Amino acid sequence: MSNLAVITTIGIIVLAVLGWFLYKKLARDKIDAFIARRKGDSKIAVPADLIEANERIPVAFALTEKTIFYENSDLEARIDLVQIDEVEYASDLFTGKEITDGRVLRLRSHGHAFEFVIDKVNSEKLESFLPPHRADEPGSVRVVG
């Protein structure tokens, strides 16, 4: 292999790695923009990862008096608190995988579970606004404070 081919190959690899880092940085900036947009009318707005199967999807997570919003540049979703049956905080996913870089917020609504990984500091703040609630407990899921 000639020197030119080696240099070209290395250059392509370096460009691919730099492109990947740029993509990740821009995605994070978009999450920050969603968080900034939601902060004004939310009790808390933080970065999180939505868990879908074995995939972690970065989202902006925001809690208002009546709704949870989670969104990124490809996703705009919400769950009304009146539709949530249970709120649980855990250290592991349904798959059994232990989470060391945060806590799992698990929401159950009409037989469907949503899992979000939120860093420890923000999950403690979130729990002060949205305490755990089991379906067999009286009352409904609501924001505190």
Image (cartoon, rainbow, N blue to C red):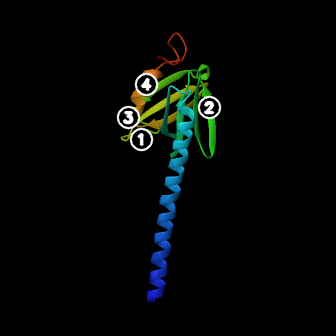
First in sequence: mark 3 vs mark 2: 2
Q: Amino acid at mark 3?
A: Lys
First in sequence: mark 3 vs mark 4: 3
In the rendered image, residue 142, in percent from the top left (x then y), is placed at: 53, 17
Q: CA distance from mark 3 to mark 1?
A: 17 Å
Residue positioned 55% across, 47% down in the render:
30
Q: CA distance from mark 3 to mark 2?
A: 22 Å
Provide the residue designation for mark 4.
127
Answer above or below: position of 50 versus 11: above
Q: Which quarter of the rendering shows the N terminus?
A: bottom left
Residue 120 badge: 3
Provide the residue designation for mark 2.
78
Residue 97 badge: 1
Disc 4, SS: helix
Answer above or below: position of 46 versus 143: below
Q: CA distance from mark 2 to mark 4?
A: 18 Å
Q: Amino acid at mark 2?
A: Arg
Q: Can residue 53 be seen here?
A: no
Disc 3, SS: helix
Residue positioned 48% across, 78% down in the render:
9
Disc 1, SS: loop
Disc 2, SS: strand
Residue 44 badge: none
Mark whose residue sits in front, 1 or 2: 2
Q: CA distance from mark 1 to mark 4?
A: 21 Å
